[in-house]
Amino acid sequence: MKKLCAFTISFSLLKFSLILCSLTKPPCFWRIKNNVDNGGDLRSDCGFVLITIDWPIEEHFYNHVINFRIPARRYEDILVMFFATDEINKNPYLLPNMSLLFSRIVGLCEDTFELLDKRYSPQSSFLHFINYNCRVRTNCDIELTGPSWMTSLKLAINSRKPKIFFGPFNPNLSDHDQFPYVYQIATKDTCLSHGMISLMLHFRWTWIGLVISNDDQGIQFLSDMREKMQRHGICLAFVNMIPENMQIYMTKAKIYDKQIMASSAKVVIIYGEMNSTVEVSFRRWVYLGAQRIWITTSQWDVILNKRDFSLDFFHGTVTFEHHHSEIAKLRNFMQTVNTSMYPVDISQTMLLWNYFNCSMSKNSNSKMDHFILNNTEESTVQHKFDMVLSEDGYNLYNAVYAVAHTYHELILQKVESQQMAEPKGVFTDCQQVASVLKTRVFTNPVGELVNMNLRENQCAEYDIFNIWNFPQGLGLKVKIGSYYPCFPQSQQLHISEDLEWTTGGTSPQVPTSMCSVTCTAGFRKIHQEQTADCCFDCAQCPKNEVSNDTDMEQCVRCPDDKYANLQQTHCLQRAVSFLAYEDPLGMAIGCMALCFSVLTVLVLITFIKHNDTPTVKANNRILSYILLISLIFCFLCSLFFIGHPSQATCILQQTTFGVFFTVAVSTVLAKTITVVMAFKLTIPGRRMRGMLASGAPNLVIPICTLIQLILCGIWLVTSPPFLDRDIQSEHGKTVIICNKGSVIAFHFVLGYLGSLALGSFGVAFLARNLPDRFNEAKFLTFSMLVFCSVWITFLPVYHSTRGKVMVIVEVFSILASSAGLLGCIFIPKCHVILFRPDSNFIQKYKDKLHY
């Protein structure tokens, strides 16, 4: 009694733990529920054995042969077998007078499904039921296995029967030394990684997650993808290498879950086998609510049994499938078939099959509001779908035809060699069957060439499908594009834009999958340390540099004749600028120079007209004439700074300025020396009279001017001024200016002028208090004070400006200093000559009396 109670309690606890686990623990949930037969389960693998008989098939043959429950995921395979064998049996040119049928369904030995081996003949209408148990039959009938390569691998061990694997191409089965009797009907994925990369580039997805199986095939795919991603600037956010062993996987499942849920990557590539730990991971993540764009291969067109209804275009599974032509007769077969001949109610099956074998016709007027779940048979018939097979279904279709062509050739060989010891449709030489199968080259009914000995196509086209989820676990595959690897690169990927029906007339919003926000035009990327290349910060382009595209690594500097716009997205042509006469400042300066020149000419005329007056004669009138003439040229030399500069004007600007100002300042110095010497004559014993009479002070002018000419000559020989362009001073403009050439020479010229001015100022300052009515020492002192003030102020202002402003400052200094000399020295004298002639006359009369 105690043992019974203990057993009861233990059993109850075990049952309760299993129920709790199924509700709370996703890993347990998948293990417990994986045998439930619905569209969301891990799919079962099975296969078919094709045989030939020389009598017609009875109408209800398959109702007796297939009398057990078929997994929902195998409906397509059963329908393809029904359709393909029916089509072949109706073809008078292929296996004439013979019937092709699949006599049994083969699954893995450990499956829970009852496995059958049945023989049928019209003479004995009874069925022999035996367990398969991996026994090897004596006949060499060709077996079709798939879609998992493990099925073929297990059945191929210690078996000499030819097998055609109709699942995705797998390199493990292509070793003919190890598996000489296994052939693959699928095309090898030679350009899959290229197509996926092209899709990412099209949608600008640069931050990608990758989930692969931890085997040789997954590692090879990772190597191919990593190489191409680096070449195109795409980065891997994470790589989950899922172990094949379930126990090892379960110890790391939560790590994989956390990694994918926490990652900012919105696009995840899945590459691995169905019915494996990779599929378990995928279903766990969807169960946990991971909203991602899953990019994968055709075998992953699974539908999860969810009750939510989502038309979110980019939160689903995007699959790449080898392109194949549509089988036009399939639709007619589905609509006209006598369902009583088959053990599966095809009208009910079509609705379940819509998920993986229907795509919305591009030319169809069907809309989503036509899709209803009530009265499923009527809606299935009325809804205008194009029946298309999945890739596995199409491979199975080709495999059936490969077997039919092989049997046809074997029968012909028997007839030709008259070896009729065995029945016509029975083949016992497995090596002969394998040899004929290997060499089969035929064209299937849709016009595609099938070569059993060459399944690698470098130009294999891909169709891109998006899987849509509907309520009650239903789904739909919609073709959204194609990939043509042998087209020019710009034409390889084609994404359909005719998807208005998906969102009620508006284009779907494409999500982004990037580590960092895209750097817009006008900015450049600054990569972060110890992060992937796709993770970066954005910084605005430096001054006068542009970037006209997104995510630019470096900004491009604009040419000197162009400048960057405010957004720094492209270069604009610079406007040429200079101090022109049309400018207000240029016009004002030109007018000032001419007015001062005219005024100086009038003063000169006045002095010449009144040359005998004491005011003019005082302090040497010849020097006054020289000073006035030099001032005229000083005013006029400022005109060289206005207008479009040239090499000649650039040289004349500085040389004329330096020479004429040297003449003017040296003349002032000579006049100052003359004043001092004139007053020194009144002191007895001085020898000044001879020097003054001989005009010795006048020699100061040519000596000083000669020195300046030597300095200018050295300047012009060593580094003369030249035409230059200033692109910094004014935004969007190229200012044409005259570069001084040698800055040292320019400052030597200014320094020499300054020394002359200071010398003149010093001498005049000492003579300012000498007694005489017409002593102009005070005027000379004040003029030199103005001159020095102007040029001392000029130096800091000149060096703090650029472009046209620099030119204006120099011209203004020339005009101001020249006007200072003119105004301080000659205006008072003109006032006496023109407005106070009596004062000038009295002095003249006294002078006459004195002599």
Image (cartoon, rainbow, N blue to C red):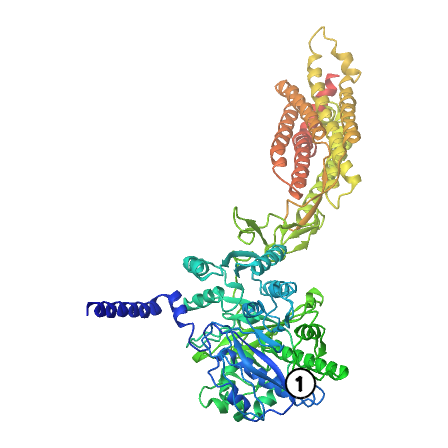
Q: Is residue 606 above or below residue 136?
A: above
- Nearest the camera: 7 or 847? 7
Residue 346 in view: no
Image location of residue 660, percent across then percent down: 75, 31
The N terminus sits in image quarter = bottom left
Image location of residue 216, percent across then percent down: 57, 58
What SS does tag 1 mark?
loop
Image location of residue 651, percent across then percent down: 77, 36
- Nearest the camera: 498 or 167? 167
Res. 361 image quadrant: bottom right
- Nearest the camera: 318 or 595? 318
Residue named by callout 1: 423
The C terminus sits in image quarter = top right
Q: Is residue 775 above or below residue 100?
A: above
Q: Tell whether 520 sits left or right of 842.
A: left
Res. 612 image quadrant: top right
Q: Is residue 236 above or below residue 713?
A: below
Residue at 66% across, 41% down: 808
Image location of residue 59, percent across then percent down: 56, 93
* Amino acid type, mark 1: Pro
